[in-house]
Image (tube, rainbow, N blue to C red):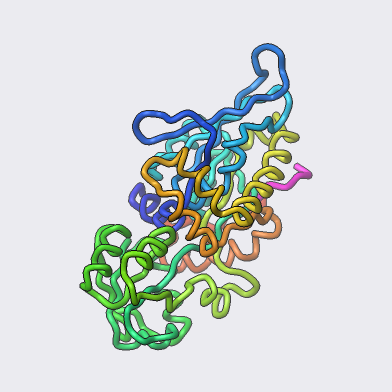
Amino acid sequence: MKKHYVIAFLFCCITAMLCAGGKKEPATAAQAKSAGNSSAQAAYTVKVVVPANAPAICIAKMASDAAAVADGAVTEYEVLQAPDMLQARLLSGEADIAIVPSNLSAILYAKGTGVRLAGAVVWGILYGLTSESVNSIEDLRGKTIITFGRGLTPDVTVRELLNAYGLTPDKDVIFNYVQSGQEAAAAFISGKGSFVILPEPMVSMVLTKKPGSKVFLDVQNAWKEKLGGDSSYPQAVVVVQKKLIENHPDYVARFLAQLEQSINWAKENPKQAGEATAKLQKGIQAPLIAKGISRMNMQFVNAEQTRPALERYFSILYKADPKFIGGAMPQDDFYYTTAK
């Protein structure tokens, strides 16, 4: 299933990650610590892990400020350049809090890990770009689209959306699959196709490097119009280990409140958020992050309010392949509430 997570997060994971103010780690990670107001050794440590890009932007201010979440606690933040490491960190218990693809949260729950969903933070980052004179999804009839992740959750999302608009995938619209989002962007820039599906921040990169290209399809808005009811699909969510909720409920509540504030700050201060993220995420350009933030659809919504949209999304993934969500819909105890 690793492959599912790698490219399922080339939606969310290829769209923005952590923050500033931490020390650079060698290899694939960057970390920052914040300590509570304790004179000696902290009573407990909380490890927070996120993949690169959009999820990292969500926590950028928290990590760069290194402010205490709760007295007696040390919070460590880490950006994972390899998103498939998320599952291993949560299964081993090494990570206490994480931002993950929404379907991975259901898979971890099905494995009996004790992971609980605390809220959604990224509501889709996929866009259709073109160099032709088209203006809507209906204009794709008879066209070929460069895309990536055959059979994975991003692919399923786009295919279900086309069906909802009366376009039959592989008949009315042809898909030219490549290995990755990077390869899809390169193919489009070099003129190997006139249509491409990409996530942010790749969208911003392509618009900069290929004059005359434009966004003709906001997958999130189209999803909301046809499939989502009142919202887009919750692509990335924050999960918390059950033991942390039970042992330190005040910490969890305060962390989520600070996370919401951090996301709002990033949206209001894209330049500073880009700089903070670039200090922790290896190889990302701050201006690119800043330019793409407006298309990253970051918003914290608690578990109770997220549940209807999440269950709609999970039901669609389940119909495509039950394994996408671990074989069954999560039960009531999957959803964190402050009353627990």
The quarter holding residue 166 reads bottom left
The quarter holding residue 174 reads bottom left
Q: Is residue 337 magenta?
A: yes
Quarter containing the C terminus: top right
Residue 110 in view of the camera: no
In the rendered view, tell whether residue 229 sits above or below residue 77.
below
Residue nearer the viewer, 100 or 111: 100
Residue nearer the viewer, 160 or 321: 160
Residue nearer the viewer, 159 or 45: 45
Q: Residue at x 45, y 43 (%)?
A: 278
Q: Is residue 236 left or right of residue 187?
A: right
Circle count: 0
Residue 90 in view of the camera: yes
**Chief SS of the magenta region:** loop
Q: Which residues are magenta?
A: 334-340
Where residue 148 appears, x then y in whole percent? Answer: 31, 63
